[in-house]
Amino acid sequence: MKKVLLLLLILFLFPLFVDAKKAQNNFIDIIKEFDADVESIAISIKNLDTGKVVYSLNDKMLMTPASVQKILTTPVAAEVLGEDYNFETGLFQRNNDEVLIKLGADPYLTTKNLKELIKKDITSQTKTIYIDDTAIDNKIWGEGWQWDDDLNTLMPRFNSYNLDKNLIKLTIMPSEKNQIPTIINPTKFPLVFFNNLATGKQTDIKVQRDTAISPNTLVLSGTVARPTTIYIPNINLKQYFENQLTKILHEKSIYIANPYRKSIVNDNDVLKNSVSHDIEKAITDVLKNSNNLTSESMFKLAGAKYSGQATGTDIDGIKMFNEYCVKNKLDNSRIRITDASGVSKNNLVSTDFVSEFLVKSKNNYAMQYLATPGEGTLTHRMLQIKNNLRAKTGTLSDVSSIAGYLTSKSGKNYAFCIITNDIKLSESDKKMLEDYIIREAYLRL
């Protein structure tokens, strides 16, 4: 009787073994077709309902995840902050002639918002403006971020003084042929320009920061054919915030001598006005568009709430992440998380851990905001399986990654992660390889 049952079990499972074998062979064949190094590619695919491994390749190998890291840190931060959380900047009345601005490290705060915040309650009677900047610490970059990405607009500095995406807008206006174009700085933030630009037939602008003179010294070279807007990452967030606030006050003919002093909100301060942005906007921006500024700010703010501290830090964020792993029985003893966004190459994860995290976090409300083909970083990818894929992509120098949830053609649900660290493949080839593997998984599994 036992032998009959065993035979029936083998016959029942045989088609699954055949399909898995086909998929395994096809994945390897695809990798070889791309002339990729098999040892530099890691894949983990697990059944979303059972957590069982369906396919693996180098899945225990530690690799740099790039922005796939956000699929790990964002659900943790979102769970701690809660679905009703708002990034809030508040204006408090302290005494008749004193006000306090409580910063919330809001990554979406703009100068226009700041103008709305103070329009009624800062008047010519105001003598002192206090600023509470304790929401998150003043560590303006993550551990291991690359100094030579200083002018990368996707990696702006961040702290409690977040304003205007922490970027400074410049407009370049061409003039007569071969003549020097005009650089317009509408923010009036103090920058020094070495204008080596020329008006030409095409627009090709190069920007360098001359830190030997000062961090706010920029060298612009190349050619300009038409009016062009460029953005420069802000070096001094506090200075920029105070500069914009002063400009707003001057527009109202309000002039305050030495107005900005540090303080914290106390029980006697009365909230008069506030501006806020909801967490849904942030989660969407992080998981669909891979916004690093929002990812890092949200992680630190969640770390503050988790630890019960007034000021959020990346250390508290990492402790929060570790506790989430303990609670969900995720073994994170071999991985390393150093920032929220995956910008640092000091981060190390395995595809096995990422896929397991996805299985355990499938009911986390943040996961509904993952991009589908046609959205965000998947705008032009895998459109033929739009209704069957939700994923987060990642890109760093020599690194490409993607992870998320896939419903196969047969209707089965999977969690998957693919990371490629092959230095020979171009970024586009890495992305194409990922697409082929996912398509094969969709068809075969």
Image (cartoon, rainbow, N blue to C red):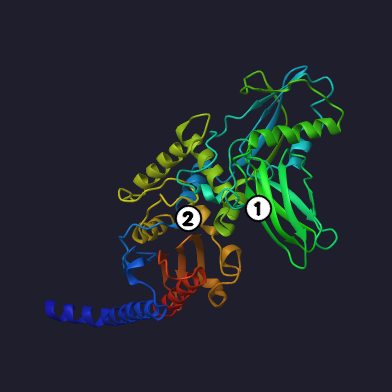
User: Which numbered marker is on residue 69?
Assistant: none
Residue 98 image point, x, y percent: 74, 19
Crowding at dot 2, Cα within 10 Å, few <14 / some 14-19 / many 20+, comes out as: many
Mark 1 belongs to which amino acid?
Val
Mark 2 belongs to which amino acid?
Ile
| Residue at the farthest right position | 253
Q: Nearer the viewer, residue 65 or 438?
A: 65
Q: Earlier in the sequence, mark 1 or mark 2?
A: 2
Quadrant containing the N terminus is bottom left
Whether residue 1 is visible to the viewer of this picture, yes or no, is no
Q: Nearer the viewer, residue 283 or 108?
A: 108
328 on left or right of 81: left
Q: Which residue is mark 1?
A: 207
Residue 17 image point, x, y percent: 28, 79
Residue at x 48% of width, y 60% of height: 397
- Disc 1 versus disc 2: distance between alpha carbons? 33 Å
Q: Which residue is mark 2?
A: 71
